[in-house]
Amino acid sequence: MAEKVKKVKIPRHDMPCQDPQVRAHNFEEVALGYTQETAVEEAKRCLQCKDPKCREGCPVEVLIPDFIKKVAEEDFLEAGKVLKVKNSLPAVCGRVCPQETQCEIKCILGKKGDPVAIGRLERFVADYDIKFGEAKFEKPEPTGKRVAIIGGGPSGLACAGDLAKAGHAVTIFEALHVAGGVLMYGIPQFRLPKEIVQTEITNLKQMGVEILTNQVVGKITSVDELMANGYDAVFIGTGAGLPYFMNIPGENLNGVYSANEFLTRTNLMKGYKFPDYVTPVKVGKSVAVLGAGNVAMDSARTALRLGAENVYIIYRRSRNEMPARNEELEHAEEEGIQFHLLTNPVSIEGDERGWVKSMTCLRYELGEPDASGRRAPVAIPGSEYVLPMDTVVVAIGQGPNPLVTKSTPGLDLNKRGNIVADEDTLMTSKPGVFAGGDIVTGAATVILAMGAGKKAAGAIDQYLKAK
Amino acid sequence: MYRVVKKRLLAPVIALLEVHAPAVAAKVEPGQFIIVRVDEFGERVPLTVMDFDREKGTITIVVQDVGYSSSLICAMNEGDKFQDFVGPLGVATDIENYGTVVCVGGGLGNAPIYPIARALKAAGNHVITVIGSRTADLLILEEELTEVSNELVIATNDGSKGVKGFVTDGLAHVLSQGHDVKVIWAIGPMVMMKAVVEYTRPLGIKTIVSMNPIMVDGTGMCGACRISVGNETKFACVDGPEFDGHLVDFDLAMKRVAFYKDEENRAKARLECDHEGGHH
């Protein structure tokens, strides 16, 4: 009895972070990770519930209490093994999953206090495993079946990992020059070091997954060709790679980037190391980021690190409606990002060279609740104001890239261009062709895409066994 | 893979490279482009395809040394390998039998116009090709283009070869002969394509141009290559690179292509400094 009371009293351990004033000017990782002592202390807070609700909140059903128990016992390598049973990219998930709305929100400790810091423990264990663990993988009996995976992002990687474990020969077709998808081109170095992503991908290769880069499916080959060339099944995980723009005047001026372009130049092409890396990216003094999701926060914080003095988040609704994770919002605020809420851009103005000079914004107020139950923002007439501006990053969302879908006859799409897939098996209208992640759901999170990749892997395995 | 199997200097600063890329060569069609990266520090550079050989599995590109990456590419030799070589990208030229067509190539534009002229001729068109350059020394692929054209007209700005003047003067020469020209393809520097388009606009002859704006991924993911066509924003990498020239906003396109001039100069200057044995 006394033991239990003591457990609850240990407060949740904060994540040590780089000082905001310092980190706002470098691309080093913001969160520094738990020490062994902190991890063990935090792990001891876990009540080891008989019927753990946290697992239900995880899209890939990580054996949460089990790996945390091993941490509490200071058996970190064993914790890593347990973690990897369900999750092939734990070092990524420990960094970018929205745990607060998935596993941690279900934690029983959260009812009266703070939940166990599951995400931070996951990261600690995964990092420990990368450093000290042996990447030993016992190759299963080959099934003789071949699966093509289109897209080397989170859903494709997760799908590949599980299929390889089941003994299938897996080939990933990646359009860019490096696999990882949004983990490489989108999420910044300071939130997810690219070395970590590549380590996890190397692990997949050691499991026998073949990764072909520079393969734009829809151009160099097609789904039908892959099926005709000996692949027994295909998984499409091409993500949400088509940037939306606002359609306001001035959007084609020099200095207006889609978030995809801005982040790709900085992360994938390492533009922050120009001219050692030759792809340039420039921000000037003042940067406006349109939107308030995680991609917007990443863009704003990247702009700051590239040397911008004023970085604004421009968002039509109020703080409560901002879709970004709380942690990202807080980090952005600490670093000095300026929030212009209930504000919408009207136009972007340029100079004689065609470069961004200023942006005109309109103020809004909250009106009656709309169909979604949120109070709809209503424009305040005559409230326009002009901000001097050098760069505008449009981060209002992405749609499905049509290169694969357009080149695949017989593949059913919804009216937004997303692939229609069976809810349980993720099989599409084409037999043997499965799809998951953002290309099916529209832009969502890394972990949901990974969950879809795992789910599809299970269904593909069943499909191949029945064939 | 992606090994340079043949190199030929077409002019003092213009190199032709034949690159081993069998999967790309199997699929590429005239009008499409590829993206290369020289090494792991390099930019993704879009280049229009000049030729392809499906049997040998090669793609031929032509590059002019105008900046940092292009100078590295021009310095590559037989046996050297590209880090990355992606394609085919973009939409292929719409090849059919139109009747009489004119292919206009300016400067480096002679390279991408070559496979288009060849395919148009093979489709039964009467192909009149107009090529031009500043001076005779910089005129490339004359022999190759002669082979795939029914008629060839040359224009040089200094009059050192053919008609003295611009390709528009060469085009005027062709049109004055009373040909019933159905479609014109014009590929070259932005100013040249604009001049051709302005020349043919009042004549009402359909004129197709190939846009080569700044790109990053080349698959429609980043939107760097957006141009305005008929007041609509298009992505040159997936919607093009060919567009109806009379609808393209060239002024905007020219401003956009100049955005990184300073950075380009900085990178190039550093490269030259390195070559002279300087330090970073």
Image: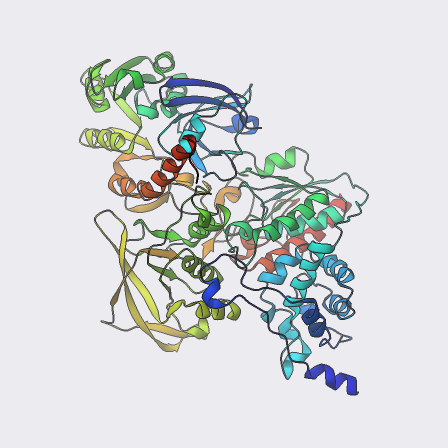
Residue A297 against residue A142 in the figure, above or below:
below
Q: Nearer the viewer, residue A284 or A141?
A: A284
Q: Which residue occupies 36% across, 54% down?
A: A283
Residue farthest along the bottom direction in this orientation: A2
Q: Which residue occupies 69% across, 54% down?
A: A130
Location of residue A209 in the rendering, given as x and y in whole percent from the top left corner: 69, 43
Residue A105: image quadrant is bottom right
Instruction: Report the side of A332 relative to A91 (left or right).
Output: left
* Count of all numbered marks drawn on residues in the image: 0
Location of residue A124 in the rendering, given as x and y in whole percent from the top left corner: 67, 63
Q: Nearer the viewer, residue A257 or A365?
A: A257
Q: Which residue occupies 29% across, 50% down?
A: A253
Instruction: Report the side of A14 relative to A371 (left or right).
Output: right
Q: Nearer the viewer, residue A8 or A212?
A: A8
Quarter in which the C terminus of chain B is drawn: top left
Residue B210: image quadrant is top left
Instruction: Report the side of A59 relative to B148 (left or right).
Output: right
Q: Is residue A213 visible?
A: yes
Location of residue B60 in the rendering, given as x and y in whole percent from the top left corner: 46, 23
Q: Is residue B92 visible?
A: no
Quarter in which the N terminus of chain B is drawn: top right
Location of residue B173 in the rendering, given as x and y in whole percent from the top left corner: 19, 17
Residue A360 against residue B41 in the figure, above or below:
below
Colour scheme shown: rainbow
